[in-house]
Amino acid sequence: MESRGSQAKAVGQRLLQAGTLGKTGLQAVSSGQAGRVLRWFSTAVLYAAFLGMGVSVAVLGPTFPDLARNVNRDVSSLSEIFVGRALGYLCGSVVGGVLFDCMNHFLLLGLSNLFTLAGLYLTPFCKTAVLLIAVMSVTGISFGILDTGGNVLILDLWGDKGAPHMQALHFSFALGAFLAPLLAKLAWGASASTQNHTEPGFDPLVMNRSSEATSDSLFAVPEDMNLLWAYASIGTYVLVVSVFLFALFCKKSSRQKKSTASVQRTRRAKYHWALLCLLFIFFFFYVGAEVTYGSYVFSFATTHVGMEESEAAGLNSIFWGTFAACRGLAIFFATVLQPGTMIVLSNIGSLVSSFFLVLFDKSRLCLWIATSVYGASMATTFPSGIAWIEQYTSISGKSAAFILVGAALGSMATPALSGILQGHYPDLPIILYTCLGSAVFTTVLFPVMYKLATLPLHCRRKKGINSEGQKFLPSRSGLQERK
């Protein structure tokens, strides 16, 4: 009887332990599923934030004449607005890189979206050029913070599996830039000021006097209400995204921070800053060539090739259209191709297409084909570069800010220098020479970056093998036999 009682007691204890283990396992599975759902939700919110940033950045182009008319300035005399926003982006990238390492990521992105929201709501009400440039500079700061933080946060969320999500993040930006002209001009119709210009009996002096009468006030309701609704609708979308970012701030996970910190500690390359400096230069030339061709292809096609304006506009559209389409396709390509492979393919496509552009600069057929190939080749380089370097060294907020500053400097310096040289040498295709030179430089630079990134890994692996051989095998011949 005592033995039966002890056996029954032991069976009961085992059943109790099994039930406890099963409950613990179910809790672990449920927490793991909750973590995956939270990670996907965070990624979707980042996509939405970059979509809003793309719309906010690109809406300035189609509404630029309306904004210039709103502050009683010519379009040519209001070009400082782009410089102010670019300088704000540089400051935002630096500030965001510093703040990203010392405060919650979602809180910082939510605050940057609030700055974007304020800038979008205030832009149509600005009645002076100085105030408009100041508002655009503040908006540029928020863009720099969001761009820096979004790239770092995607890497923190997905680690080695972040390449497709990095492509999707930048595709969201390109999609927003594609939708901006549709929203600004098609969704809200033609501007009222443009319609007034076509009315019979229209006197431009009346508009000038009315503009001078309202120029004393800093803020006023714009005459073109479509301009107001365009910016207000984009600002409302940014407001909704910021609410989700603040909700994620309240739902932060300390476990994810610990795992991310451990990954970052084990991925510190020996030549960390040398790699960042080379990537800084790489993005300087790549982004500079991208912005240069996208900005000057219209004027180049009309003046150098002799195209009609409608045909040149279609050429400009096919460049950005293939650019956005290939960023979308790159989401699927990144699941089967390594980031380094995608960079090599992009460099080859850029080099070949720019070479044919220079070689047949007067051919319209070559211009159409090479422009589409060039836009497709330039699409995946930037997100692939960030995903590639994460494989070899950690990317913190400061590191991402340093890389993005190089890209921003390239987007400002290269188009300006190319435009000056094109003015001095109007008979030469300086724009095409710039793109070809940048393609050659990036194609040559990437193998150097790859060699520098993989060299410390080979050295560490060799040292590890030698240490194991010295520990377990007393002789060199024994080590060779084991190998």
Image (cartoon, grey):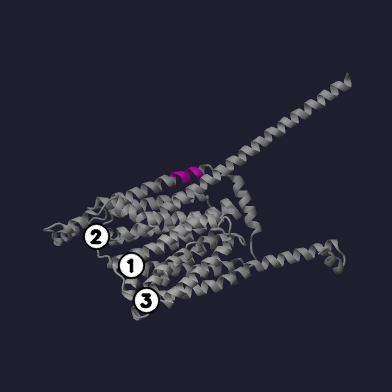
Q: Please state which of residues 121 and 161 is positioned toward the viewer in this rendering.
A: 161
Q: Is residue 195 visible?
A: yes
Dot 3 surroundings within 10 Å: few (below 14), some, or many (20 or more)? some
- Badge 2: how crowded within 10 Å, few (<14), some, or many (20+)? many
Quarter of the image for residue 365 reads bottom left
Q: Disc 3 vs disc 1: which is toward the camera?
A: 3
Q: CA distance from mark 3 to mark 1?
A: 14 Å
Q: Is residue 152 visible?
A: no
Q: Nearer the viewer, residue 320 or 401?
A: 320
The amino acid on which the numbered mark 2 sits, given as a three-letter code, is Arg
Seen from this angle, which residue lies furthest top? 1
Residue at horizontal 74 percent and vertical 31 percent from the top:
18
Which label was assigned to residue 247? Answer: none
* Alpha carbon distance from label 2 to label 3: 37 Å
From the image, state whether disc 2 or disc 3 is nearer to you: 3
Reading the image, the residue beneath label 2 is: 69
Q: Which residue is mark 3?
A: 362
Q: Which stretch appears magenta?
A: 243-248
Mark 3 or mark 1, which has the lower sequence index?
A: 1
Q: Which residue is mark 1?
A: 312
**For this view, does 383 lie left or right of residue 10?**
left
Residue in the foreground of this view, choosing between 344 and 234? 344
